[in-house]
C-alpha cells in the first residue's frame, strides 16, 4: 500500500532479461528502507525488491517485472537512463498525505496535451473507456505513482494540475505528448461503483 507521495526519482542503469525482466535502479532512498522482499512503487507499479547494493553516492535495488506487468504498464518502454518515480511501502502510523494507492495499474493512458500555466503544468490525458465511471472532477487518481486531484473531465479526457513542488520531485517535467502514463483509479471510487452496480441487479 502507498500514498502517491514520491520519495525519490530513480534512474534505471541496467536492464536484464532473464525469464522475467529485471530492472536495476539507482536511488537516494535510505539504504535501510530498501529491504529485500519489501514492496516498492516504481512509476505506480507495486514491485518487490529482490536485491540491493551501493554504487558511489547512490544506493540501488533490483525489481523483477513479469510479462503481465510489462503488458499492463509503461515499464515495457523504459530503457537504460529512464527516470522512475519511487515510493517505499506505507507502514502503520505513517502520514497519508496523498490517497491510498494499491500499486495495481488499471491501464495506461496517453497524454493528449501538455501546457504550463504560470509555474504549474496542466496535463490532459485520455480516459480509457473502461475507467470512465471511476474518473470524476475533484476525485483522486494515481498517475505514474503520483497522487493527483482531477481538475476537469470531458467526454474522452481529464485534466490534472501539477504544482511546482510536485514537478520538482517527480518525472512530470520530462513527459511528452502521446506518452503513455500508468493509471490507477481511486480505490474508494472503485468500491462505491461496484456496490452501486451490484445493487442495481
Image (spheres, helix red, strand yellow):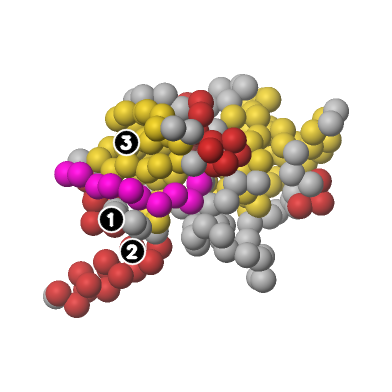
In what element is the residue under mark 3? strand
Sequence-first tag of 3 and 2: 3
Q: To which residue does mark 2 refer?
A: 189
Q: How many marks overall?
A: 3
Does the rendering let one see residue 128? Answer: no
Q: Which residue is mark 1?
A: 136
Give the residue at x 24% y 47%: 153
Q: Which residue is mark 3?
A: 124
- The part of the image, by quadrant, that contains residue 177 is top left
* Residue 143, placed above or below residue 119: below
Q: Mark 2 or 1 closer to N-term?
A: 1
Q: Are marks 2 and 1 in contact (CB under 8 Å)?
A: yes
Residue extending farthest top: 80
In the image, taking residue 144 as reference, residue 131 lies left or right, namely: left
Judge depth for marks 3 and 2 and give the one in front. Answer: 3
User: Label 3 neighbourhood size at 10 Å, few (<14), some (14-19), many (20+)?
Assistant: many
Q: Nearer the viewer, residue 172 or 81?
A: 172
Task: Give, as a single range, the part of the protein colored magenta.
Answer: 146-155
- Rendering coords of residue 171 (x, y %): 54, 33
User: Secondary structure beneath disc 2?
Assistant: helix
The secondary structure that dominates the magenta segment is strand
**Real-space CA distance between mark 3 and mark 2, rounded to the nearest whole angstrom:** 20 Å
149 falls in the magenta region: yes
- Give the CA distance from mark 2 to mark 1: 9 Å
Give the camera-side residue of 65 and 169.
Answer: 169
Left or right: 106, with 168 as reference point: left
Residue 122 occupies which quadrant of the picture? top left
Near mark 2 (Cα within 10 A), the count class, few <14, some 14-19 or many ≥20, is some
Q: SS class of the residue under badge 1?
A: loop
Name, please, the residue furthest toward the front. 118
Amino acid at each position: 500500500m502507498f500514498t502517491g507521495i514520491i520519495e525519490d526519482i530513480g534512474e534505471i542503469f541496467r536492464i536484464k532479461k532473464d525469464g522475467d525482466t529485471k530492472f536495476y535502479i539507482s536511488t537516494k532512498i535510505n539504504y535501510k528502507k530498501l529491504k529485500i522482499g519489501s514492496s516498492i512503487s516504481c512509476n505506480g507499479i507495486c514491485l518487490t525488491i529482490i536485491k540491493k547494493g551501493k554504487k558511489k553516492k547512490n544506493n540501488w535495488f533490483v525489481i523483477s517485472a513479469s510479462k503481465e506487468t510489462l503488458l499492463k504498464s509503461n515499464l515495457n518502454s523504459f530503457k537504460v537512463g529512464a527516470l522512475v518515480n519511487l515510493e517505499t511501502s506505507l507502514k502503520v502510523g505513517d502520514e497519508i498525505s496523498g490517497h491510498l494507492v494499491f500499486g495495481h495499474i488499471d491501464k495506461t493512458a496517453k497524454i493528449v496535451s501538455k501546457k504550463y500555466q504560470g509555474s504549474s503544468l496542466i496535463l490532459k490525458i485520455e480516459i480509457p473507456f473502461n475507467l470512465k465511471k471511476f474518473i470524476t472532477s475533484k476525485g483522486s487518481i494515481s498517475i505514474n505513482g503520483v497522487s493527483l486531484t482531477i481538475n476537469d473531465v470531458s467526454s474522452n479526457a481529464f485534466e490534472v494540475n501539477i504544482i511546482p513542488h510536485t514537478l520538482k520531485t517527480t518525472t512530470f517535467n520530462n513527459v511528452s505528448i502521446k506518452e503513455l502514463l500508468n493509471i490507477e483509479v481511486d480505490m474508494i471510487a472503485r468500491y462505491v461503483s461496484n456496490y452501486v452496480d451490484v445493487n442495481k441487479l
